[in-house]
Image: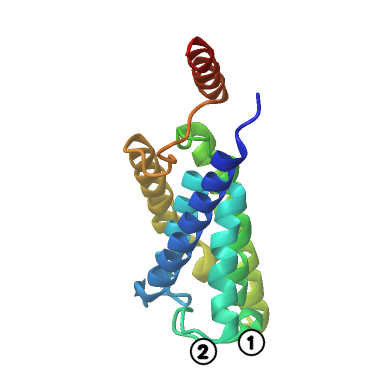
Amino acid sequence: MSTPAGLESLEQLHRLIWSAIFAACIAVGAVLHYQQFPIPLTLQSFFVMLAGFSLGAAPALTSVGFYLFSGALGLAVFTMAPAGSACLSGPTGGYLVGLLPLALMCGLAARHHHGPEWTLGLFYGLLGLIAMHSIGAWQFARMEGYSYLGLIRQLLLPYLFPELCKLVAALCVSQAMHQLGFFRVATSREPEDWHQSFVFIHKKGQSK
């Protein structure tokens, strides 16, 4: 039994709204940064992981797409960098592009209406963080002239513990929000429930 078209449209709108909300959160996360490392430590990756764990891969990628597109258009949503598409090709642009595989990996761990499972969340979250930092560190080191040793010591190791903390926090927050029903469409039901409702209404109409 397939989901009714009206409910499917409502769920699509629901996911789109949450994608836009998380895109705004990612932009806010760029403003909240700690400038003590070569690359500012921000909350962008936290909100990207939270979007992936909470919404799934496609809506999370949409959130990151909204965010990157807004910055490319000229909105000041990137951390300590001029807005515009040139930022994506600059030294820190790899970290921005790396948000896409991070969203994808975390989205693969999402479970519809139930939030991420811890083991899958940690596994896919780590893969996503490795992908993001590999892309970002490679582009930054290539453009700024870092050696391989400098890349590891200054662009990877300082971010290991903070990113792991953000990963665990994103998993906890996502599970809590799922338990509170943040991402469930108010009128959504399982297909079997819809079938039972239609049978009940049909029988009630025949009895009149």
* Relative image position of residue 156 (x, y in whole percent): 53, 63
For label 1, the residue is 86
Amino acid type of disc 1? Ala
Residue most toward the top? 207
* Relative image position of residue 153 (x, y in whole percent): 52, 67
Left or right of residue 121: residue 166: left
Q: Report crowding for label 2: few under 14, some 14 to 19, many 20 or more residues within 10 A (C-alpha).
A: some
For label 2, the residue is 82
Q: Nearer the viewer, residue 136 or 103?
A: 103
Vertical comparison of 90 with 173: above or below: below
Q: CA distance from mark 2 to mark 1?
A: 8 Å
Q: Residue at x 52, y 35 (%)?
A: 112
Callout 1: SS: helix
Amino acid type of disc 2? Pro
* Relative image position of residue 149 (x, y in whole percent): 60, 68
Q: Residue at x 44, y 71 (%)?
A: 27
Any part of residue 165 in sight = yes
Q: Report crowding for label 1: few under 14, some 14 to 19, many 20 or more residues within 10 A (C-alpha).
A: few
Q: Residue at x 40, y 49 (%)?
A: 170
Any part of residue 150 in sight = no
